[in-house]
Image: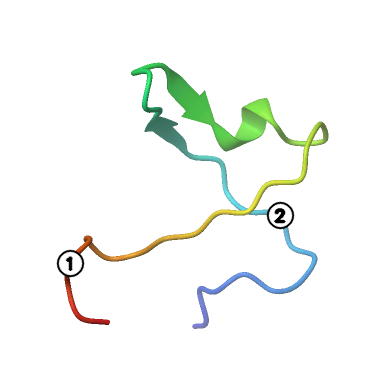
């Protein structure tokens, strides 16, 4: 089974702490702003 999102599909909701320690959820911005979510490995690592 392919678990990746397809173009036009809605991303599942998730919450993460912000740099100011408040909790932000994807659903807080759904329909209000365009969101880009990027994941990267730790700084100073190859790749």
The residue depicted at 81 percent of the width and 31 percent of the height is: 32
Check the image and report above or below for 15 versus 35. above
Side (left or right) of 14 relative to 36: left
Of 5 and 44, the residue lying toward us? 44
Side (left or right) of 4 relative to 36: left
- Circle 1: is it few (<14), some (14-19), or many (20+) Cα within 10 Å? few
Residue 4 image offset from top left, x and y in percent: 54, 74
- Camera-near label (1 vs 2) is 1
Query: Could you say which quadrant of the image residue 19 lies in?
Result: top left
Residue 35 image offset from top left, x and y in percent: 68, 47
The residue labelled by disc 2 is 10
Side (left or right) of 39 relative to 11: left
First in residue order: circle 1 vs circle 2: 2
Of 2 and 45, the residue lying toward us? 45
SS for callout 2 = loop
SS for callout 1 = loop
The residue depicted at 75 percent of the width and 72 percent of the height is: 7
The residue depicted at 48 percent of the width and 39 percent of the height is: 14
Q: How many numbered circles are shown?
A: 2
Disc number for residue 44: 1
């Amino acid at each position: 089974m392919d678990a990746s999102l397809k173009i036009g599909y809605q991303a599942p909701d998730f919450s993460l702490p912000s740099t100011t320690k408040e909790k932000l959820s994807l659903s807080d911005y759904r329909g209000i702003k365009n969101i880009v979510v990027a994941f990267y490995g730790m700084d100073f690592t190859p790749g």
